Amino acid sequence: MKTKPLSLIFIAVMTMFNAICFTTKAQNTKPFVVVLDAGHGGTDVGNLGNGFIEKDIVLDVTLQIGAILEKIPDFKVIYTRKTDVLIDLYRRGPIANEADADIFVSIHCDAFTNQAHGIGTFVMGVAKSEKNLETAKKENEVIFLEENYEENYAGFNPNSPESLIGLTLMQEEYLDQSITLAGLIQTNIVNNLKRKDRSVRSAPFWVLHSSYMPSVLVELGFLTNKQEGPYVNSKKGRRELAREVANGIITYKNNIKLATSGAQNPVITEQEIEEAIKISEEDIYKGVDFKVQLAASKRKLETKPQNFKGLKDVDRDKEGDLYKYYYGNTSDYTKIQLMKTYAQEKGYSSAFVVAYKGGKKVKLSEVLSTKDN
């Protein structure tokens, strides 16, 4: 049997090595895919508060958000629309699914019959108030402008609470991540642009329900308000809002990676956690204690701040052979979400929220779906 020359063997080995390295590098450099959805478009103009045109404003802001993200090498941005066209609601979520997107962000402007104002960010869920439900109905009613909507939406009625509640099931798996993303965007706009905080809320939006990733809907402000409408419509307002939404997305991406620079430089402080929360009956779950689980270990650690990256109010509980460490204790669900984000920025990237009722741990999803009155 004739042996191959060493040079050919070396070349074959190096070719295989380079192929492995290339494949590994390609896997490690998968871009963070963001799908940006400019609401409305084409024959669906959105709301016309103060004579401003929602579809044009949200398209401009969306494109500016994308332009910021596209300058960062490991981001990939996909748009549901880049021009003034009507994209059916039922097609928007699947665009993100087909792209295997990491997040889906839909941009809108609000409107109301009075002088309501402020920034609101929504995740998919059961509406906790009539106002949230009305906002969802208003955004969902665009389906009546689409051809064959009876067939495409399988009997869905945007004016039926039963239909709306049924939408929430598909996004339940991503609720936690969606709230984190929404909280970062909301906090940036409120704190940096000094806008009124209408908080992160849940409501059944069709555009969010069919996406298989964390998804949020941002209401940039009320075009119907005499002061806020002109700001949102202005070049300055659009530019500033786009910047803060983009920064929220960037921070979210950094927070889901281990040992990021964001872990050493939090964008949310403990003082902001206390000051930014406006406690309302919508946020309070009576008889429930929410905590942020930081870690589980066989090691028994003193719950001193120096052992937990400076975090205060850490407690310890033993479950089986493991000690579990928790940060915070509140019945305010919005506050615990901010505390979780703060913990992630400190370096606990896998931190998550748990719930206790009557001193016993219960499923978070059950608590959120059966809120006490």
Image (cartoon, rainbow, N blue to C red):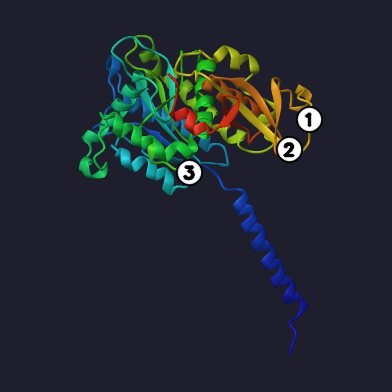
The image quarter containing residue 14 is: bottom right
Where residue 235 appears, x then y in whole percent?
41, 20
In the rendered view, tell whether residue 357 sits above or below residue 7.
above
In the rendered view, tell whether residue 74 sits above or below residue 124.
below
Where residue 57 appears, x then y in whole percent?
36, 25
Q: Which residue is mark 3?
A: 101
How packed is label 1: few (under 14 Cα within 10 Å), some, or many (20 or more)?
some
Q: Earlier in the sequence, mark 1 or mark 3?
A: 3
Q: Earlier in the sequence, mark 3 or mark 2?
A: 3
Residue type, mark 2 in image: Ser
Where residue 88 appears, x then y in whole percent?
29, 39
For the N terminus, the quadrant is: bottom right
**Circles 1, 2 touching at the beta carbon (< 8 Å):** yes
The image quarter containing residue 292 is: top right
The image quarter containing residue 135 is: top left
Along the line of sight, the residue nearer the viewer: 143 or 328: 328
Label 2 sits on a secondary structure element that is strand
Query: Disc 1 versus disc 2: distance between alpha carbons?
Result: 9 Å
Query: Disc 1 versus disc 3: distance between alpha carbons?
Result: 39 Å
Q: Which residue is mark 2?
A: 297
Residue type, mark 3 in image: Ala
Where residue 61 appears, x then y in whole percent?
42, 27
How packed is label 3: few (under 14 Cα within 10 Å), some, or many (20 or more)?
many
**Which residue: 40% across, 15% down?**
231
Q: Which residue is mark 1?
A: 301
Label 1 sits on a secondary structure element that is loop
Label 3 sits on a secondary structure element that is loop
Residue type, mark 1 in image: Leu
For the C terminus, the quadrant is: top left
Of the two numbered discs 3 and 2 in the rendering, the one whose residue sits closer to the viewer: 2
